[in-house]
């Protein structure tokens, strides 16, 4: 059995696409192997590859083309049932003989595969990394051990980390060339992009409510990565300090003014969702509280 975990989100045409890991497969007890092929972008390529496998009696479980080909090249991933290492070596040899195949990576029989586009992830042309909830939890746990979560220095340090992330998010978004209206509409495009990128990075699903134009916002986040990690540590308190920092710095850079974020609801405080209030002031100085 193959279980496919893919986040699919519909969005209006012209919006930035989700950052995504191509596919994660969890294959259970069966023996599967795989090849990832870099090929020429021309008609008949896939047919030639599948013809080779058919001649060798290969049982194909899944064929995937991660995205629209570009630059004259494309990538194809193929998962095969019951093809041991000797079988895999022979398939590699036969496929390398095709003039349409530019490169091959093979994966020996195992129970699961994780394919990432081009062996790297980029967000707006910047190299990215994957942080799991366990990694975030360990970071929070280290801060707790060295000062305690209630310690002001710990909380301010976490917010400062968030400030750095928020600034990078703003700088990424500011480089995007979009056709928008004059003046006030530009920031709305930036906030839409923030919401999309935030979710694409796995930080959580964000809902931005503009209470007072360019002055006050309510931010609601489902599955907030920071608060979920803190919940794993059984912390019963408001825990969104990194998130506060991200919001403060992003809004400060967006409007060129001082921004202060406060956490008003938290799953670790008995609420069903994490909620933040962001106020944008005239001063450009940000004070940690």
Image: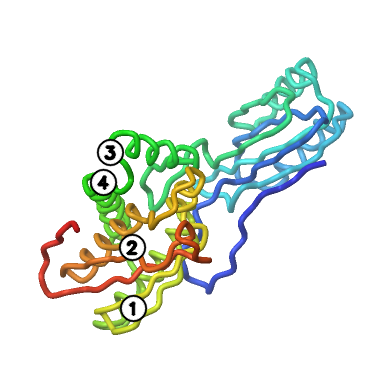
SS at mark 2 in the image:
loop
What residue is shown at x 75% (from left), y 35% (from top)?
79
Dots 1, 4 in contact, CB < 8 A: no
Q: Is residue 131 left or right of residue 80?
A: left
Determine whether label 3 and label 4 are within 8 Å by CB.
yes
Please indicate whether residue 157 sits to the left or right of residue 173 in the image: left
Q: Secondary structure at mark 3?
A: helix
Q: CA distance from mark 3 to mark 4?
A: 6 Å
Q: In the rendering, at what x and y percent does residue 129 appear?
A: 43, 40
Q: Earlier in the sequence, mark 1 or mark 3?
A: 3
Q: Pick whichever of labels 2 and 3 is earlier in the sequence.
A: 3
Q: Which residue is mark 2?
A: 176
Q: Residue at x 67, y 49 (%)?
A: 5
Q: Between residues 172 and 155, which one lies in front from this camera angle?
A: 155
Q: Quadrant of residue 275?
A: bottom left
Which is nearer the eye, 96 or 183?
183
Whole-percent x, y for residue 45 in the image: 70, 42
Query: Which residue lies at the image location 81% right of the left edge and 39% below the top edge?
Result: 61
Give the mark, 1 or 4, whose residue is nearer the N terminus: 4
The image position of residue 200, as x and y in percent, is 48, 56
- The residue identified by callout 3 is 147
79 sits to left or right of 38:
right
Query: Dot 4, crowdedness within 10 Å: few (<14), some or many (≥20)?
Result: few
Residue topped by disc 4 = 151
Q: CA distance from mark 1 to mark 3?
A: 46 Å
Q: CA distance from mark 2 to mark 1?
A: 11 Å
> Element at badge 1?
loop
Contact (Cβ within 8 Å) of mark 4 with mark 2: no
In space, the residues marked 1 and 4 are separated at their CA atoms by 44 Å
Upstream in sequence: badge 4 or badge 2: 4
């Amino acid at each position: 059995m193959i279980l496919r975990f893919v986040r699919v989100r519909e969005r209006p045409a012209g919006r930035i696409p989700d950052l995504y890991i191509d596919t994660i497969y969890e294959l259970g007890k069966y023996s599967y192997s795989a090849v990832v092929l870099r090929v020429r972008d021309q008609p008949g390529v896939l047919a030639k590859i599948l013809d080779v496998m058919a001649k060798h009696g290969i049982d194909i479980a899944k064929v995937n083309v991660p995205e629209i080909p570009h630059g004259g090249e494309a990538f194809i991933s193929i998962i095969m049932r019951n093809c041991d290492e000797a079988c895999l070596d022979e398939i590699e040899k036969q496929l390398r003989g095709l003039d349409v195949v530019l490169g091959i990576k093979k994966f020996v029989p195992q129970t699961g595969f994780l394919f990432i586009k081009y062996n790297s992830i980029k967000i707006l042309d910047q190299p990215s990394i994957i942080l799991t909830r366990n990694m975030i939890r360990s970071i929070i746990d280290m801060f707790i051990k060295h000062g305690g979560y209630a310690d002001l220095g710990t909380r301010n340090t976490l917010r400062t980390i968030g400030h750095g992330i928020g600034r990078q998010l703003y700088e990424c978004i500011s480089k995007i060339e979009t056709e928008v209206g004059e003046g006030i509409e530009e920031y709305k495009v930036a906030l839409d992009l923030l919401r999309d990128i935030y979710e694409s990075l796995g930080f959580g699903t964000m809902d931005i409510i503009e209470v007072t134009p360019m002055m006050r916002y309510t931010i609601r986040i489902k599955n907030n990565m920071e608060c979920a990690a803190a919940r794993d540590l059984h912390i019963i308190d408001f825990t969104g300090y990194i998130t506060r920092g991200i919001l403060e710095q992003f809004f400060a850079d967006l409007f060129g003014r001082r921004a202060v974020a406060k956490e008003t609801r938290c799953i670790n405080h008995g609420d069903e969702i994490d909620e933040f209030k962001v106020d944008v002031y005239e001063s450009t100085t940000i004070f940690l509280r």
